[in-house]
């Protein structure tokens, strides 16, 4: 190959890899993503947000990278964090503070983007504490080793690098000075926590509770994440605030329940980060005088094998406090579902939003294992990007799902309803594409038998931005003497893999 030919090939390769989906350094939002950015909002009473610039990442010379979200009064707080063994320093500090303070008396959270402060040893832990203490001092608190910080901490960015802590602590008072409650304040805060995100992810809703329907409450939330996303509670952060009143003893369980069916049901690349954190703050600022705090609905002991992300009301408890708690749990689950979907829609290099819907007669957990396995498959995701109806890759991902494929080296504890029954039968498995336009589903496999697929129609479906893959694990007629249980449905949201994903992550650190 001549030097001239080699140079032309390199130039062509560089041109092909132009980042058409990744976030520009000036944080301009791509035209296709503008529709996901709210232009107004209804934000919870008594919460303030502010941002400032610290220049955590050397290449960031102007964009705000410090975010402060606080309550004007001490509030109840809950948190759900990564299960990654190498938990980042801010995760460790925040978990400890929540436990020591029994989930009450918190001011809010301080966030930096540009550096994860993960795998940074004792000094990283000290830096996280310094961020929390500096924020506490903005509200007149005197630092003391005897009292845990009243501020939670989040960091996001490159793993294994230390924070420029002096620049951060100098910027925290500036974020405090910039506090406000307008839509612009909230939107700027959502922007300041972004890394490779192409748009800020911000939502706000209003809702009412059954026992006092004349009172209007608000809930607002922001999240960041576009890569390293496969939460198991990527670099995923979520901050949710409400002016409802929640009991400190209940807030963690309510948040964990909602997380299991929302943020724990999304996957971009199958990587669980060291920094995953989702927090919920409740200050009760909109609650009428004398209204008791929302307590734990009795059905949150364990996520039920339901057909939807929102659990059913419990018929055994119909007193007003229980009704209110259930209503709020439903609102939170629905709200967090929409917030989590925004993360998938911003997947690094993603061109498609894919819903994986799996139905099983055995249990919800069987359906969830299968859905997650399909969502994590690089071969499935690349086929979807290439508009290739290669359903064999979907069947393959079902067949090797943990707990479905027997693995003596990785034994899995099965639930009582899963023991002594075939979890997946090839002769009962059906797979379809469900078009986003509401037209008839395209059947690919029916009861283990391949269909004569209309490739042209398959390509038309795969041209759409939104797509659903529907898997039935117990299809076909009921056999004589067989008992068919009620169907359990698990839903996982994912995206495709494009060339752009490799481009973004190939040079993320450098």
Image: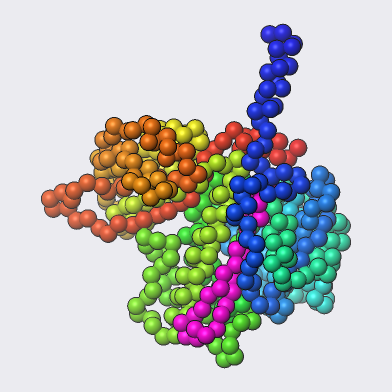
Q: Quadrant of residue 182?
A: bottom right
Q: Residue at x 61, y 77 (%)?
A: 243
* Residue 466 in sight from this viewpoint: yes
Q: Is residue 395 magenta?
A: no
Q: Is residue 199 magenta?
A: yes
**Residue 455 point in image, percent of width and height:** 37, 31
The vertical placement of 222 against 243, above or below, is above
As drawn, is 81 to the left or to the right of 18? left
Query: Which quadrant is the C terminus positioned in?
Result: top right
* Residue 426 in sight from this viewpoint: no
Q: Which residues are magenta?
A: 196-225
Q: Residue at x 75, y 75 (%)?
A: 147
In this view, the residue farthest toward the left is 480
**Residue 105 point in image, percent of width and height:** 68, 78
Q: Residue at x 78, y 70 (%)?
A: 179
In this view, the residue farthest toward the bottom is 290
The vertical placement of 318 against 100, above or below, is below
**Residue 285 point in image, percent of width and height:** 64, 81
Q: Residue at x 69, y 78 (%)?
A: 46
């Amino acid at each position: 190959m001549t030097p001239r030919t080699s140079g032309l090939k390199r130039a062509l390769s560089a041109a092909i890899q132009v980042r058409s989906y990744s976030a520009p350094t000036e944080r301009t939002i791509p035209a296709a993503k503008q529709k996901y950015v709210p232009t107004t909002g209804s934000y919870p009473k008594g919460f303030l947000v502010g941002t400032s610039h610290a220049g955590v990442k050397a290449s960031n010379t102007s964009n705000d990278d410090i975010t402060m979200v606080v309550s004007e009064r001490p509030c109840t707080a809950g948190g759900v964090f990564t299960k990654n063994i190498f938990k980042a320093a801010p995760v460790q500090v925040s978990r400890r503070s929540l436990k020591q303070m029994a989930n009450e008396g918190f001011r809010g959270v301080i966030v930096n983007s540009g550096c994860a402060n993960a795998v940074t040893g004792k000094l990283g832990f000290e830096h996280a504490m310094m961020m929390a203490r500096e924020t506490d001092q903005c509200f007149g608190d005197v630092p003391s080793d005897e009292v845990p910080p009243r501020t939670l901490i989040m960091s996001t960015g490159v793993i294994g690098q230390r924070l420029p802590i002096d620049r951060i602590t100098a910027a925290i008072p500036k974020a405090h000075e910039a506090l406000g409650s307008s839509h612009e304040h909230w939107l700027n805060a959502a922007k300041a926590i972004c890394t490779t995100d192409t748009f800020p992810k911000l939502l706000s809703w209003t809702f009412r509770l059954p026992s006092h329907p004349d009172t209007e409450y608000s809930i607002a939330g922001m999240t960041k994440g576009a890569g390293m996303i496969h939460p198991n509670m990527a670099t995923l952060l979520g901050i949710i605030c409400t002016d409802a009143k929640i009991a400190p003893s209940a807030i963690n369980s309510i948040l964990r329940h909602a997380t299991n069916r929302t943020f724990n049901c999304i996957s971009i690349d199958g990587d669980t980060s060291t920094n995953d954190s989702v927090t919920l703050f409740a200050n009760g600022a909109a609650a009428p005088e004398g209204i008791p705090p929302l307590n734990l609905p009795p059905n949150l002991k364990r996520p039920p094998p339901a057909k939807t992300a929102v659990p059913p009301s419990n018929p055994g408890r119909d007193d007003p406090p229980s009704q209110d708690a259930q209503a709020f749990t439903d609102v939170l689950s629905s709200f967090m579902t929409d917030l989590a979907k925004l993360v998938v829609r911003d997947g690094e290099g993603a061109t498609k939003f894919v819903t994986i819907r799996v139905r099983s007669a055995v249990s919800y957990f069987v359906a969830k294992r299968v859905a997650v396995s399909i969502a994590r498959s690089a071969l499935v995701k690349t086929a979807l990007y290439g508009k290739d109806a290669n359903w064999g890759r979907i069947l393959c991902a079902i067949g090797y799902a943990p707990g479905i494929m027997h693995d003596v080296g990785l034994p899995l504890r099965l639930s009582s309803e899963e023991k002594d029954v075939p979890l997946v039968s090839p002769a009962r498995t059906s797979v379809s594409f469900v078009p986003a336009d509401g037209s008839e589903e395209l059947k690919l496999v029916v009861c283990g038998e391949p269909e004569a697929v209309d490739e042209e129609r398959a390509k038309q479906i795969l041209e759409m931005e939104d797509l659903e893959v529907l898997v039935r694990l117990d299809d076909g007629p009921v056999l004589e003497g067989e008992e068919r249980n009620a169907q359990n449905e698990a839903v996982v949201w994912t995206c495709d893999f494009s060339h752009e994903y490799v481009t973004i992550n190939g040079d993320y650190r450098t």
